[in-house]
Image (cartoon, rainbow, N blue to C red):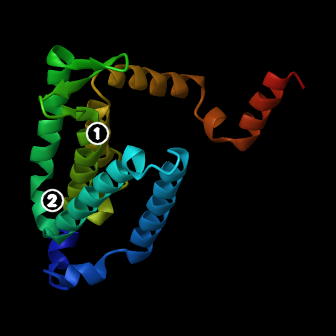
């Protein structure tokens, strides 16, 4: 039995979930966004319609989406995690062949109405599938090397396909140079002094 299944009775449903939201984080989001709106209004010379109003409208739509997602039962997102990950991988492959170029990079899929960036969807899908995996995995296996390999493989595949081999080579190179050189603060201090010529 997974962690979610064993605690499903304590998970709030319906509008009770509103009370269970992380309201301090939401308050921080509203505060930072409000400061941003004021700054946009200021730099536009007091013109609300130039930058501030469109940003407020996007923020309002985003908050509606946030509350809609928060109202969906958590088991739904767990069950949809594999499909979301597979779809994100498919879109990452598709963008390599049919992607539109924007800001010097071919990372967009032009849908006509909007330009979709699959790497942004993968960030969400990766969190979902890793959460579902560790919810399914018994707690006594979470630190065993064999059971760490699937998440590592998922992360490498998600690294935008073209970047995965590069990152994997960097990991191997780090081990070849000696992992202790990267985690030791004394080694970091030595490298810092070397670059400064001390």
The answer to whether residue 139 of the structure is visible from this angle is: yes
Left or right of 118? Residue 48 is right
- Of 105 and 87, which appears nearest the observer? 105
**Residue carrying label 1:** 120
43 vs 93, left or right, is right
Residue 126: x and y, percent?
26, 45
In this view, which residue lies farthest toward the front? 46
Q: Earlier in the sequence, mark 2 or mark 1?
A: 2
State the residue at coordinates (83%, 29%): 193
Percent of width and height locating residue 192: 77, 31
Indicate the quadrant where residue 88 lies: top left
Residues packed near mark 2 inside 10 Å, few (<14), some (14 to 19) or many (20 plus):
many
Q: In this orientation, which residue lies closer to the viewer: 171 or 24?
A: 24
Q: Going by the picture, which residue comes out furthest to the right?
A: 198
Q: Residue at x 28, y 62 (%)?
A: 63
Q: Secondary structure at mark 2?
A: helix
In this figure, which residue is indicated by the disc labeled 2? 78
Residues at marks 2 and 1, CA–CA distance in whole angstroms: 19 Å
Q: Residue at x 43, y 20 (%)?
A: 169
């Amino acid at each position: 039995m997974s962690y979610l299944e064993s605690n499903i009775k304590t998970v709030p449903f319906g509008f009770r979930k509103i009370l269970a939201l992380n309201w301090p984080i939401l308050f921080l989001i509203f505060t930072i966004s409000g400061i941003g709106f004021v700054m946009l209004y200021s730099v536009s010379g007091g013109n609300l319609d130039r930058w501030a109003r469109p940003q407020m409208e996007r923020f309002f739509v985003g908050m509606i989406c946030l509350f809609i997602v928060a109202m969906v039962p958590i088991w739904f997102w767990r069950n949809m995690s594999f499909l979301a990950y597979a779809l994100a991988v498919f879109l990452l492959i598709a963008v390599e062949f049919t992607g539109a170029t924007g800001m010097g990079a071919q990372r967009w899929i032009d849908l006509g109405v909007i330009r979709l960036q699959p790497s942004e969807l993968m960030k969400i899908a990766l969190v979902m599938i890793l959460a579902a995996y560790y919810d399914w995995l018994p707690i006594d296996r979470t630190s065993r090397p064999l059971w760490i390999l699937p998440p590592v493989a998922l992360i490498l595949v998600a690294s935008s396909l073209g970047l995965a081999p590069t990152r994997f080579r960097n990991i191997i190179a780090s081990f070849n140079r000696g992992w202790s050189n990267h985690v030791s603060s004394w080694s970091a201090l030595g490298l810092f002094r070397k670059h400064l010529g001390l």
